[in-house]
């Protein structure tokens, strides 16, 4: 039972943050596409902005890894 | 590196103003300052005023602008061809140019309009060519006799052919023929042959059935359909050759005259530039006064040149740079060849201020290291080295692609280095085939040690950023800001050491001293940074933990490579297994180029640069000659 709970917590840690990242990236991606249509020279900045919400899922992944590995 | 600049003043006789600006323009190292603020301000208010152009300068400017516009009009009629560079001296031939330019504009305009009309006519006739090509094939099957009428039609729907055939049979009593074929553009073309005199009735039937008859220009009316085909082909060919001859005539004109006009235009641009630049100069009753900025290393050279040219009548002096000048000093970035490709990353940001740092060397050092740490696979690294070498060779003349290839090459070398440390060669393929094991750590299993390593890198990188911020504050003599940044660094160290002690990484004995240190530093931090200082501290700690991405993205890369190798083994077929492994490794390699690049850049832009970089510098825009601006494109106009 304990193993199941640990696995569930790890899955929640990465799953919820992944959903949050996906939602944020979808909003930034849509706005970014609009920006690029008007100012293509901002492509570098848009790529960086798109990468910013990935912090959430990366930290979620780290937390999941710690839940699974730390005792 | 940000080039050291000097604040410069030039004084001389007023009559020499344009000549002085020409010398400065030739040197391409002087940026004129249109405001006297910060220069000879105190004396300036009494004696110095903005330079007012005299009548001669104004009329020269109007004359040159008019001539330039006319040369522009001439070029608009000429074809864009590569021409030689002319070395003719423009000044003596200006009078001749003024006399001949209108004649040349008229000639070129006429040629251009004639060529344009021919091309338009040919384009209209080509519209019929597709139809006629199809018609010609149908006419081959018909015996041409004087008692037959031909009608050409286009059919929209193939199903209507049967119905049309019935209608024609009922109209002509079966004395007709309907041949159809598909034209090059996919449309269906039909040819109706009937007895002489049936033409009008056929046209009426086609109108009723809503089948469009193919109509020709009115000039074709007198001709029969077969003659129309022959005439049209001859006409199109005639128009093409006539248009070609006009084009050659224009190219020959361009080859003969364009280099001279181009040279004259450059000279006019330079003259106009000098005349416009005089508006940024100042004058007293008898003297000229120019103030501006130039790289310190060029001051002596330009001073000597002015001295030689004007026999000591014009003097260049450097002035002491005061604190309020620092915001207006223009910025030039100059880096050693190794760092130059990395300037493409820095160009995404506004220029740094003169008092700040050029971020290029930092990104040049750390970007490849982070890329290598994230990708960390010797096999992928070797593939990317080969790819970057090919790109460098193939796109030698395209600066951006060449620079990107150089960055990829350097980053791939680091990837090989870290790949050897991690013992990764296409994932665990190196271990399976050659027993190539990790020297330091195996990323796939040792997750926590790699997290600690990534956070340690974050601590080092962020602390470097904060230290550079501290140096910037000291340079600007902002003592309180410097103290705040120093306290921030100390606090971060204490917090991280405390966390390490609580997690058992540092001895438990150190917990209490670090808590005391934090309690002592906290009020000082409030004093130096204000009420919002804890937020800044939390942001800095968050930034450090953000470096965990180095481990996380690296781990996804190594796991995907591991999956690729396992999948290949599970297929049970050597060919299928190889294909699956290659495809998955290819996918991983593509992700392995983009993901580490984006995240390494993000770590610089968001986490590192925010600690010290002050953006919003003023771009260095020296007086420069027109031909130097267009050095790369001098062959075309």
Image (cartoon, coloured by chain):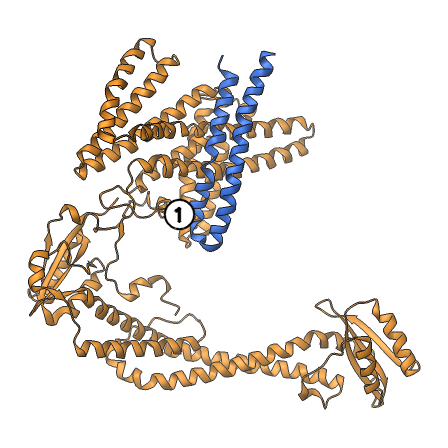
Tell me the quarter of the image containing the C terminus of chain B.
bottom left
Instruction: Residue at the far right: name it.
Output: B173
Q: Residue at x 30, y 35 (%)?
A: B611
State which quarter of the image contains the N terminus of chain B: top left
Q: Quadrant of residue B146 in the image? A: bottom right
B106 relative position to B326: left or right: right
Supply the letter of whichever chain is orange.
Answer: B
Q: Is residue B553 visible?
A: no
Q: Position of residue B103 (x, y in %)?
A: 37, 86
Query: Against B424, is B138 above or below?
Result: below
Q: Position of residue B614 (x, y in %)?
A: 28, 42
Chain painted in blue in the figure: A
Q: Position of residue B511 (x, y in %)?
A: 31, 12
Q: Secondary structure at mark 1?
A: helix
Q: How many discs appear?
A: 1
Identify the residue position indicated by label 1 in the image. B403
Q: Is residue B17 above or below residue B316?
A: below
Quarter-wise, where is residue B51 in the image? bottom left
The residue lying toward the viewer, choosing from B490 and B465, is B490
The residue located at (40%, 52%) in the rendering is B399
Q: Is B501 located above or below residue B482 in the figure?
A: above
């Amino acid at each position: 039972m304990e193993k199941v709970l640990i696995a569930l917590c790890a899955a929640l840690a990465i799953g919820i943050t992944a959903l949050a990242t996906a939602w944020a990236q979808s909003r930034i991606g849509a706005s970014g596409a609009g920006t690029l249509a008007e100012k293509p020279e901002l492509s570098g900045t848009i790529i960086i902005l798109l990468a910013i919400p990935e912090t959430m899922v990366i930290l979620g992944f780290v937390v999941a890894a710690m839940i699974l590995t730390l005792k | 590196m940000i080039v050291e600049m000097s604040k410069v003043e030039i004084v001389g006789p007023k009559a020499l103003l344009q000549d002085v600006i020409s010398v400065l323009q030739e040197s391409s190292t002087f940026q004129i300052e249109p405001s006297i603020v910060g220069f000879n301000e105190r004396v300036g208010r009494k004696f110095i005023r903005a330079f007012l152009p005299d009548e001669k300068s104004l009329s020269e400017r109007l004359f040159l602008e008019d001539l330039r516009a006319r040369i522009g009009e001439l070029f608009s009629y000429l074809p864009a061809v590569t021409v030689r560079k002319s070395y003719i001296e423009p000044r003596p031939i200006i009078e001749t140019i003024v006399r001949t330019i209108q004649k040349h504009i008229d000639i070129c305009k006429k040629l251009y309009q004639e060529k344009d009309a021919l091309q338009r006519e040919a384009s209209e006739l080509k519209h019929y060519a597709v139809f006629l090509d199809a018609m010609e094939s149908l006419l081959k099957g018909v015996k041409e006799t004087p008692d037959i009428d031909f009608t050409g039609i286009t059919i929209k729907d193939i199903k209507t052919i049967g119905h049309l055939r019935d209608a024609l049979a009922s109209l002509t009593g079966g004395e007709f023929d309907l041949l159809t074929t598909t034209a090059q553009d996919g449309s269906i073309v039909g040819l109706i042959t009937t007895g002489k005199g049936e033409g009008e009735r056929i046209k009426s039937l086609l109108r009723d059935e809503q089948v469009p008859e193919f109509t020709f220009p009115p000039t074709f009316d007198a001709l029969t359909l077969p003659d129309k085909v022959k005439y049209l082909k001859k006409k199109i060919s005639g128009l093409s050759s006539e248009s070609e001859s006009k084009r050659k005539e224009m190219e020959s004109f361009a080859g003969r005259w364009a280099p001279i006009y181009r040279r004259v235009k450059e000279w006019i641009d330079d003259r106009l530039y000098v005349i416009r630049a005089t508006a940024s100069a100042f004058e007293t009753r008898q003297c000229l006064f120019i103030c501006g900025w130039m790289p310190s290393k060029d001051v002596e050279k330009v001073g000597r040149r002015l001295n030689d040219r004007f026999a000591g009548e014009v003097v260049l002096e450097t002035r002491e740079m005061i604190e309020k000048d620092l915001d207006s000093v223009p910025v030039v970035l100059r880096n050693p060849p190794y760092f130059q490709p990395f300037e493409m990353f820095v160009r995404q940001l506004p220029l740094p201020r003169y008092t700040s740092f050029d971020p290029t060397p930092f990104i040049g050092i750390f970007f490849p290291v982070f890329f290598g740490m994230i990708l960390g696979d010797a096999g992928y690294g070797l593939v990317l080295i080969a790819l970057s070498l090919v790109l460098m060779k193939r796109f030698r003349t395209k600066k951006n692609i060449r620079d990107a290839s150089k960055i990829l090459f350097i980053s791939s070398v680091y990837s090989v280095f870290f790949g050897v440390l991690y013992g990764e060669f296409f994932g665990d393929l190196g271990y399976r085939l050659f027993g190539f094991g990790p020297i330091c750590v195996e990323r796939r299993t040792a997750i926590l040690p790699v997290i600690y390593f990534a956070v340690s890198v974050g601590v080092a990188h962020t602390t470097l950023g904060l230290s550079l911020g501290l140096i910037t504050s000291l340079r600007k003599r902002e003592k309180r800001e410097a103290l705040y940044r120093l306290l921030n660094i100390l606090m971060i160290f204490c917090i991280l050491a405390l966390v390490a002690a609580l997690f058992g990484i540092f001895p438990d004995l150190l917990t209490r001293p670090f808590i005391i240190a934090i309690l002592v530093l906290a009020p000082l931090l409030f004093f130096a940074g204000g009420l919002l200082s804890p937020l800044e501290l939390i942001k800095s700690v968050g930034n450090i933990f953000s470096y965990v991405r180095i481990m996380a993205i690296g781990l996804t890369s190594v796991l995907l490579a591991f999956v690729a190798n396992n999948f290949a083994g599970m297929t049970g077929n050597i060919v299928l297994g190889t294909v699956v492994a290659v495809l998955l490794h290819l996918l991983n390699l593509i992700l392995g180029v983009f993901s580490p690049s984006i995240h390494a850049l993000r770590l610089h832009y968001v986490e590192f640069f925010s600690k010290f970089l002050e953006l919003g510098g003023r771009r260095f825009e020296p007086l420069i000659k027109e031909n130097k601006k267009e050095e790369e494109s001098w062959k075309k106009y």
